[in-house]
Image: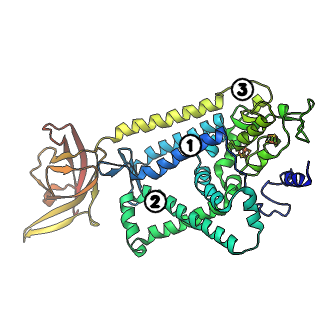
Amino acid sequence: MSSSSNNSKKRFELDHERLATTDQDGNRIYIHPEERSGRWSGRRVKFFYFLLSIYLILPWIYIDQRQIVLLDIARREFHLFGHIFYGHDAPLILFILVALGFFFAFVTSVGGRVWCGWGCPQTVFMDVIYRPIEIMVEGSARERRELDCAPWGAEKLYKRGLKWLLFLISTLHIVHSFLGYFVGTRALLKMSLGSPADNLTTFLFVLGGTAILLFDFGWFREQFCIIACPYGRMQSVLMDDHSLIVGYDHTRGEPRRSSEVITPQEGDCINCYLCVKVCPTGIDIRRGTQMECIACTICIDACDGIMEKVKRPMGLIRYTSECELRGESSRYLGIRSIIYLLGILVGISLFVASLSYKSELGISMIRGSKSPYQTITISARQQEIVNHYILAFRNPDQGEIIVQISQEGDGSKIQMTTLDNPMSIGPGVTRIPLFLRFRPQLLTDGSHLITIIFSLTRKGEQTPYSIMKREVTLVGPL
Ligand code: SF4
Ligand code: SF4
């Protein structure tokens, strides 16, 4: 074996005592993983493009002039595939979050870090946007390492400048698409054409978001997975020996070969270090399952390529489990996974049950002025009292609802004034003032309880489909 080959391999012989991405002084070792294609990489890239398309296209889909996914935090209105949720629907969102939390726990307990390798935005954006840009501008892993060490000159300035410019354009696109989910894509288009000063908060959000993403994808990279991601820290608690991992078959691979000449006494690993060279977190999978492994499967493809060359069966590194690697049978669903599954079902059931309850028209009566009542002088001997309310209607339906307001019992003593009666209530939240006017003699000890009736009829129908009642305490001077 040549000395340059030995030196190259030595560089990938990792220290047992420290992270693969730090040197003996604790400084960051910047990783340039080698590119490798294979069956798993091909599947991942296709899946990543699918996810990226959803992310970019979804906020541009409108049905009946409504964005199908819009999380309007300022107005506390959340549009999700035809359903509208409001701020006071927080319990519903909680049920979704509970189901989502259990879903992640379930996926991890069964599929290990499959989320990290296949669905996490950190991986998806890195592998389909930033890494390809870097390879296109700066070349292969070896060329990128050489560029890192090269003194600053015209070529380095040009390559670094072009790379960061392309990073910036891509990041701006990612951040604007993200913002489209919160302010609406049409509103965002208008804002983008106007002056930043007109929408300063949004503009600052774009600037801040772009700076954070550029820092993360341009420089921080695998460090986010290794030291910052909370899910990465939790995965060892959620996984067990039956969970799916990307693992090295120690029994088959060891003792690893010291040369590329195959002898019967040696294992299948030819110690080529390719699995280390391609790893985006810089680890050596042959040392067993490690927290830094994001299950990206690239080492599987790299090793399969080597096995093909040395005419040994593929799968020395493969999707497996700790049990299977020890030669024990591996079960798919354990007690822990079943509990997580039940948690998902409970969360979804509560959400669906609340959804059917929520589909009714919501009516709230809120006092409309700071003072609970006003006194009006009609004549020298007669005064009347006015109570002002705001009727807040929350219509989760997509159609209009006709609302007729009346009083229970004898309504002749109280004059009700509102904009229209009956009134047409469209989808979303509608607020309408209501004035209740009466003589002071109606009050007993300064108050009087009445019941307001709301008859709800769908547009185009004659008969009310629902009658709702709200009790109101009229107040005046004692
Ligand atoms: S790629 Fe395969 S053969 Fe090469 S060092 Fe890794 S495990 Fe061994
Ligand atoms: S060890 Fe393999 S699967 Fe894990 S991060 Fe490295 S290359 Fe990806």
Q: Residues within 10 Å of mark 1 (few under 14, many from 20)?
A: few
Instruction: Pinpoint residue 374: horizontal percent, then vertical percent.
Output: 20, 66
Which residue lies at the image location 69% right of the left edge and 34% below the top edge?
Answer: 243
Q: Residues within 10 Å of mark 3 (few under 14, many from 20)?
A: some
Q: Secondary structure at mark 3?
A: loop
Residue flagged by tag 2: what amino acid is it? Leu
Q: In the figure, 197 relative to 306: above or below?
A: below
Residue found at the very far top of the displayed protein = 329
Identify the mark nearer the N-term, 1 or 2: 1
3D distance between C-alphas at marks 1 and 2: 25 Å
Residue under label 3:
330
Instruction: Pinpoint residue 351: horizontal percent, then vertical percent.
Output: 44, 39
Identify the mark nearer the N-term, 1 or 3: 1
Q: Quadrant of residue 220?
A: bottom right
Residue 46: image tag: 1
Q: Secondary structure at mark 1?
A: helix
Q: Quadrant of residue 310?
A: top right
Compare residues 465 and 118 and report the one nearer the observer. Answer: 118
Residue flagged by tag 1: what amino acid is it? Lys
Compare residues 415 and 13 and report the one nearer the observer. Answer: 13
